[in-house]
Image: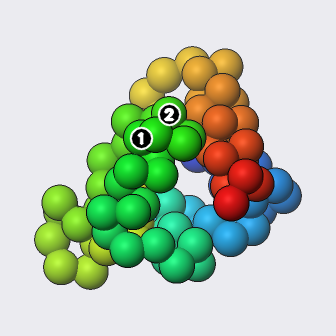
Amino acid sequence: EGNHKLVENYLQERIPALKTIKPRASYLAWIDCRELGMATDDLKLFMEKRAKLGLNQGYIFGEGGEGFVRMNLGCSRKLIEEALNRLEKAINSL
């Protein structure tokens, strides 16, 4: 739960264009990236090439998942902070 709160607070404070979807119970965070206005393929490339993050793309989970990514939070906070910093840097470079 602490890792979810870390992601939620980080996005609210530093990347407000992205929103988290509160999970019922999981170590996965759903992040709404639709405000970035990227097509599905562009979002995938952006996360892989610019942010250097291997996130699951929402579209693979079915209709309505376009524009979302899934981040695994079952790791250390240091690793999550590094991922969030990369994401912020990539978005700021747009």
Residue 86 lies, in percent from the top left, at 65, 36
Task: Indicate left or right for 82 with 60 as reference.
Answer: right
Residue ID at (18%, 63%):
61
Residue 7 lies, in percent from the top left, at 64, 47
Q: Relative to 47, does residue 86 appear above or below in the rendering?
A: above
State whether residue 76 appears in this view.
yes
Task: Indicate left or right for 9 with 79 as reference.
Answer: right
* Tag 2–tag 1 contact (CB < 8 Å): yes
Residue ID at (49%, 60%):
31
State whether residue 25 appears in this view.
no
Image quarter of the N terminus = top right
Q: Secondary structure at mark 2?
A: loop
Q: Which residue is mark 2?
A: 52
Q: Which residue is mark 1?
A: 48
Q: Relative to 48, does residue 70 appear above or below in the rendering?
A: below
Question: Is disc 1 surrounded by few (<14), some (14 to 19) or many (20+) residues within 10 Å?
Answer: few
Give the residue type at disc 2.
Lys
Question: Is disc 2 surrounded by few (<14), some (14 to 19) or many (20+) residues within 10 Å?
Answer: some
Image quarter of the C terminus = bottom right
Q: Secondary structure at mark 1?
A: helix
Q: Relative to 23, does residue 40 appear above or below in the rendering?
A: below
Quadrant of the image occupied by residue 44: bottom left
Quadrant of the image occupied by residue 63: bottom left
